[in-house]
Image (cartoon, rainbow, N blue to C red):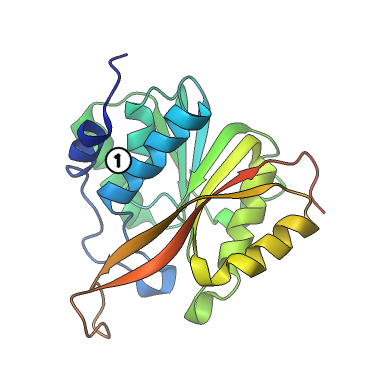
Amino acid sequence: MKKLKLKELESCLQQVDTFESPKLLLEQYPTRPHIAACMLYTIHNTFDDIENKTIADLGCGCGMLSIGSAMLGAGLCVGFDIDADALEIFNSNIEDFELTNINMVQCDVSSLSDSMPETFDTVIMNPPFGTKHNKGMDMIFLKTALQMAKTAVYSLHKTSTRQHIQKKADEWEVKMEVIAELKYDLPASYKFHKKKSVDIEVDFIRFSAKKLLN
């Protein structure tokens, strides 16, 4: 497989269609192509956790992270999302990119915690940040991811929650490493957004998967 450069990967991901009508209840914010490309390029080149690996993408939305992983040579990517409309866009993206190493599953991610232990080499996700009515959802996603992964989990979390996440990682006896601090450029997606975009400080974190979680 041709080795993609970071700029090439980002350019490809800019062609991925995203939410037409994002749903506030699901905290649907697309992963920006630049952030997605930087995440995946680092996972691929620094940690060798994508090429020929089985990848799960939790809360996959329209498939940005799955499609990028597939382009970098993943053995198989499976996206999991509760929203049929998002998965419809995801499926259209797969057809447009003519990718054959991606599947998708419509389900509630929180229901996967006990059903798929150590099924995937790597889990990559941009989970709900657990704001407003979704309080704690980020930790539900993380715990589920850690149960599903054989090797590592890569995830985005608000920098303001770092101490809390570190406390949970210690509790679960999981190694947590902040790989990068990023500015998440959040475009105005909903009526209550007063600004065209806002920058949120987020941590890009690698968690080493643990075999048994309490």
Question: Does residue 146 appear in the picture of this structure?
Answer: yes
Q: Amino acid at mark 1?
A: Asn
From what the image shows, is residue 181 above or below residue 2? below
Which x, y percent locates residue 202?
Answer: 44, 62
Work out whether 170 lies above or below 174: below
Quarter that holds the C terminus: bottom right
Secondary structure under badge 1? Answer: helix
**How far across and how far down the image is residue 131, in percent?**
49, 76
Residue furthest out toward the top = 1
Left or right relative to 12: residue 120 = right
Relative height, residue 102 to residue 188 (above, below): above
Indicate the position of residue 145 as horizontal and vertical percent values.
61, 47
Residue at 76% across, 57% down = 170
Quadrant where the image shows the N terminus: top left
The residue closer to the viewer here, 47 or 71, is 47
Residue beneath disc 1: 91
Query: Residue 157, image x and y in percent?
Result: 50, 61
- Residue occupying the point 46% across, 56% down: 82
At x 40%, y 43%, the residue is 39
